[in-house]
Image (cartoon, rainbow, N blue to C red):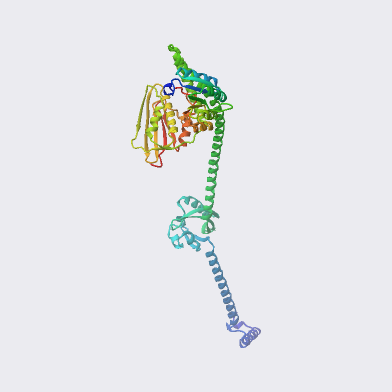
Amino acid sequence: MSPARSRQARPLILIVDDDHGMVRTLRDILIAKGFKIRVAYSGREALEEARRHPCDFALIDIRMPHMNGVQLYQALRAVRCDLPAVFMTAYASEDLADEAARLGPLAILIKPIDVD
Amino acid sequence: MGIETESYAQLKQRLARAEATLNALRRGEVDLVIGATEPLVVRFKTLVDEKERLFQELKRQEQALRESEARYRVISELISDYAYSFRIEADGEWTLEWVTGAFERITGYAPEEANGRRGWIDLVHPDHAPLALEHVERLLSGQDDVSEYQIVRKDGESRWLRDHAHPMWDEAQGRVLRIYGAAEDITARVQAETALREYAERLEDMVEARTGELLEAQEQLLREERLALLGQLAGAVAHELRHPLGVITNVAYYLKMKLPSPDEAFSEHLEIMEAEAKAATKIVSDLLEFGRMVQPERAQVGVSDLIDSALEGSTPGENIRVSTRTESDLSPAFVDSQQIAQVLRNLIRNACESMPEGGDLTISADEPMPQETIRIQVSDTGTGIPPENLQKIFKPLFTTKPRGIGLGLAISQKLVEANGGRIEVQSEEGKGSTFVVWLPVSIET
């Protein structure tokens, strides 16, 4: 992922994962790579963040409590239908991942993610 | 006694006898008188009557004999056994002097033919000659004997006989003069017994084999149950490990990126951390993969592409020479390319790990049975596999590596078999190993 390929000079990425360690490390790596980052630890927080800070790109964990990544992405797209997203999951094949794939994200990354 | 000495009384008495005889002749009571002084009176009629009576008796007996013979002949022809009588000469020669018609039906020889040969013993199957000779010995010593043996019919077919024989001992000559006997064709019975015995033996073998199969199946089931349970547990743990492993990988990545000019030891430690996280990730992935086998999506795949894709994802050490030999006009394989590439990567990794001091890794592909199967061979010049381990290496959780949980080859075998192929190994300790993967050729060529 490189900022140069994005629409703006410093695109804003929304990272959504209930795992704090994952959010923290991804945030720091992506900041170091030159992105602007907002983070959220649940679907509800993510919707709140997205409303206040419209993002260019979402990095979403599929399996989260209360609202899963797929439901979150559907809700985000209800506001902004062309929001590009990448899903993350620890489960290479499960029903949710298949469902996520049908929503047409840019990619589904299997954890642990190769950050390059 | 002279006439001169006869007294008057004697003469008178003789005269009276003569007159009585004469009167009897006249009356027809006497037919002939022989002798002058002492006449012998012969009565013809009595003789004739007696002769007639004897004649009638003879006729009656002859008739009874004829009837008895006829009855006997009919019966002896009707019964399936044959009866016989041998005459034994002083010089030991046997002559079949009488035999019933069933002899020819059973042996195929006419009685004269049997005599013409070297006696009855010639009929006996060569394998049973010793049995028959014992039978003969017992008979010649005067004992009754029952013996079962095989004969060879004139048409070459073998028949079983049960021979009851009774010798006639002659005290005067001190030897057996005749042997009477009856022989029964028991071929059908013996065949039935043999078939029954063979069937019983086969049944025993079948039961034994089936028991073995059942035990094997039971063990297999137990193994699979244990594995399934283990798989569930391991899968759950593996899932949970992926998150922390991801975070560790991220941390290492971040530190490597951000540290302005880390010293050598620092970099090394980060490298170790990354490598270990990668190794842990591999174990976790294997565990998940084994527990959840994905259905193959089979399609036509070029064999060279498969090998290239496997090699691309592999990192053989610098001291390993890699060479590929692929026949030019191979048919495409009909497999899930990702799954088979994963198998080949696994085989390549194993090969490299077996050559820590370096060596040759050779990957070759050919088509021994055109249009049927593709053979891909991954060979190394590494440590090889001890013979006692060759049977076990495809079993889950078997490993000889200092690290790893022994699922790589088990997964490879499952994947190859799910794709309609099979995997084999040949190895010589100290010389190296060759893993052979047979893949089906695409049906639509």
Residue B78: where, in percent of width, then height?
53, 64
Dividing the picture into quadrants, the one containing residue B264 is top left
Q: Is residue B426 visible?
A: yes
Residues A67 and B85: in front is A67
Residues B403 and A36: in front is A36
Dividing the picture into quadrants, the one containing residue B12 is bottom right
Outermost left residue: B328
Left or right: where B154 falls relative to B3: left
Q: Is residue B255 above or below residue B305?
A: above
All told, the count of numbered labels is 0
Left or right: where B327 falls relative to B39: left
Image quarter where the C terminus of chain B lies is top left
Dividing the picture into quadrants, the one containing residue B235 is top right
Q: Is residue B199 above or below residue A108?
A: below
Residue B385: where, in percent of width, then height?
44, 28
Residues B266 and B62: in front is B266
Image quarter where the N terminus of chain B lies is bottom right
Residues B202 and B173: in front is B202
Residue B278: where, in percent of width, then height?
47, 22
Residue A46: where, in percent of width, then height?
54, 24
Q: Is residue B38 visible?
A: no
Q: Is residue B300 above or below residue B262?
A: below
